[in-house]
Image (tube, rainbow, N blue to C red):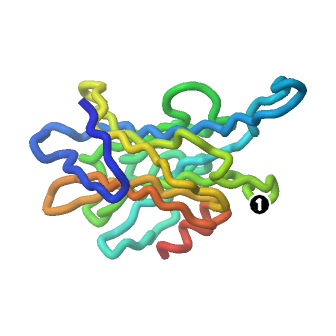
């Protein structure tokens, strides 16, 4: 059964699960429904293109190689341990909007953190921010049993912010853990976010 986390909580993923190596990290969101229109008709939702990315950081928390940034333009890390499912352009529909597969056994020893990021594509040009998004979440699934291990709903008000850092998987004392971060930033692109870590 999945453990629902609150912001700032951490949980062991591999402790007590010796065989755990293949994970799917699902990220989801929905555009806020617009009200209005004639007698409430003509509402709908904004077309907001959110993009999930993963920063693979070393022990010092640095991104040392651009190939360690996995996103829609570089869907597989150079080591093959992190694979992006591809870009969902609207966020419509139930369940995960984008997924990242992670093979913990193939992550190079110098990589200590996988930071998951969601940003709005062309947020400035389109005048969009995360105040226009609802029901954002990150979850971690054990692929061998297809069971959800962790679920974290982001419930803060992110108005005015164009990127979210929902969570990270990190290495600690030989085990892998998950940290529910849930922070927003004003970074307008994945390259701006990546520059924070170089």
Sort mark 1 into few (<14), some (14-19) or many (20+) by Cα contacts within 10 Å.
few
Q: Say left or right for 162 vs 47.
A: left
Give the SS element for disc 1: helix
How far across and how far down the image is residue 6, in percent? Answer: 34, 50
Snapshot quadrant of residue 153: top left
How far across and how far down the image is residue 93, in percent? Answer: 60, 26
Snapshot quadrant of residue 124: bottom right
Above or below, 65 relative to 14? below
Residue at figure coordinates x 22%, y 53% from the top left: 176
Residue at figure coordinates x 77%, y 34% from the top left: 35
Residue at figure coordinates x 49%, y 76% from the top left: 198
Above or below, 71 relative to 146? below
How far across and how far down the image is residue 30, in percent? Answer: 61, 36
In this rendered view, identify the residue nearer to me: 172 or 43.
Answer: 43
Q: Which residue is mark 1?
A: 124
Outermost residue on the front side: it is 39
């Amino acid at each position: 059964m999945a453990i629902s986390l609150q912001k700032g909580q951490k949980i062991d993923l591999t402790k007590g699960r010796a065989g755990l190596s293949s994970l799917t990290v699902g990220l989801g969101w929905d555009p806020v429904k617009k009200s209005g229109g004639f007698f409430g008709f003509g509402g709908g939702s904004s077309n907001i293109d959110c993009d999930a990315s993963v920063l693979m950081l070393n022990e010092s928390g640095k991104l040392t190689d651009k190939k360690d940034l996995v996103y829609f333009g570089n869907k597989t890390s150079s080591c093959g341990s992190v694979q992006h499912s591809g870009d969902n352009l609207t966020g419509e529909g139930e369940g995960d909007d984008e997924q990242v597969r992670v093979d913990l056994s193939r992550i190079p020893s110098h990589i200590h953190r996988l930071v998951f990021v969601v940003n709005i594509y062309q947020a400035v040009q389109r005048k969009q921010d995360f105040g226009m998004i609802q029901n954002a979440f990150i979850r971690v699934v054990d692929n061998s049993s297809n069971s959800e291990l962790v679920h974290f709903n982001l419930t803060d008000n992110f108005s005015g912010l164009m990127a979210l850092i929902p969570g990270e998987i990190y290495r600690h004392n030989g085990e892998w853990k998950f940290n529910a971060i849930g922070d927003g930033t004003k970074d307008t692109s994945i390259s701006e976010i990546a520059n924070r870590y170089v």
